[in-house]
Amino acid sequence: MNEETAVIRVLADYYAAFSTLDVQAVLSYFHEPSVLIGPQGVLAAPTYAVLTTVFTPAMEGLRAKGFGRSELSVRNLKSLSATATLVTGVAVRYRVDGQEFERVGVTYVLYKADTRWKIAVLIIHDANEVALDE
């Protein structure tokens, strides 16, 4: 499996885990430390305990909206080095009944820690702002 395929597989597995709305299921997909950037600001998360404080209310909010699952539509993937890859795309969120209810722009920087790719940076942004300049 080449590195691009490995990165896409990690993100697909992350989205499957996220769709369970179980915070513990998603933590191992993140590097320690990691950085989250979104409309609320920037959060440096040195440990999984800090990530838990962010993901728990976010997942509860999605559960309250009738969230069923989400999928990543990858728009761009760019290897930055042997240990860093940049991925931009759109997270498409669906309700339990299968109806789409939200699209969120996402940018990830994955870092290859030992032999496994992990999310080091997650940026949430407008779904229309996903293009990378070549």
Image: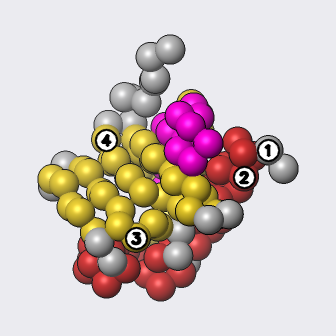
Who's the residue at 58% across and 73% down the image? 17
Furthest residue to the right?
Answer: 1
Q: Quadrant of residue 125?
A: top left
Q: Dot 3, how many residues are within 10 Å of its Cα: few (below 14), some (14-19), or many (20+)? A: some
Q: Which residue is mark 4?
A: 125
Q: Is residue 49 left or right of residue 133?
A: left
Q: Which residue is mark 1?
A: 2
Mark 4 or 3, nearer chain start: 3
Q: CA distance from mark 2 to mark 3?
A: 20 Å
Q: Which residue is mark 3?
A: 32
Q: Dot 2, how many residues are within 10 Å of its Cα: few (below 14), some (14-19), or many (20+)? A: few
Q: Position of residue 40 (x, y in %)?
A: 15, 55
Q: Look at the picture and state if 39 lies above or below 21.
A: above
Magenta-drawn segment: 78-94
Who's the residue at 26% across and 51% down the image? 37
Q: CA distance from mark 1 to mark 3?
A: 24 Å
Furthest residue to the left?
Answer: 41
Answer yes or no: is residue 26 visible.
yes
| Amino acid at the residue labelled 1 | Asn
Whether tag 4 and tag 3 are in contact, CB under 8 A, the answer is: no
Whether tag 2 and tag 3 are in contact, CB under 8 A, the answer is: no
Badge 4 element: strand
Residue 108 falls inside the magenta stretch: no
| Amino acid at the residue labelled 3 | Glu
Mark 2 or 4, nearer chain start: 2
Q: Dot 4, how many residues are within 10 Å of its Cα: few (below 14), some (14-19), or many (20+)? A: some
Q: Dot 1, how many residues are within 10 Å of its Cα: few (below 14), some (14-19), or many (20+)? A: few
Q: Look at the picture and state if 129 lies above or below 71.
A: above
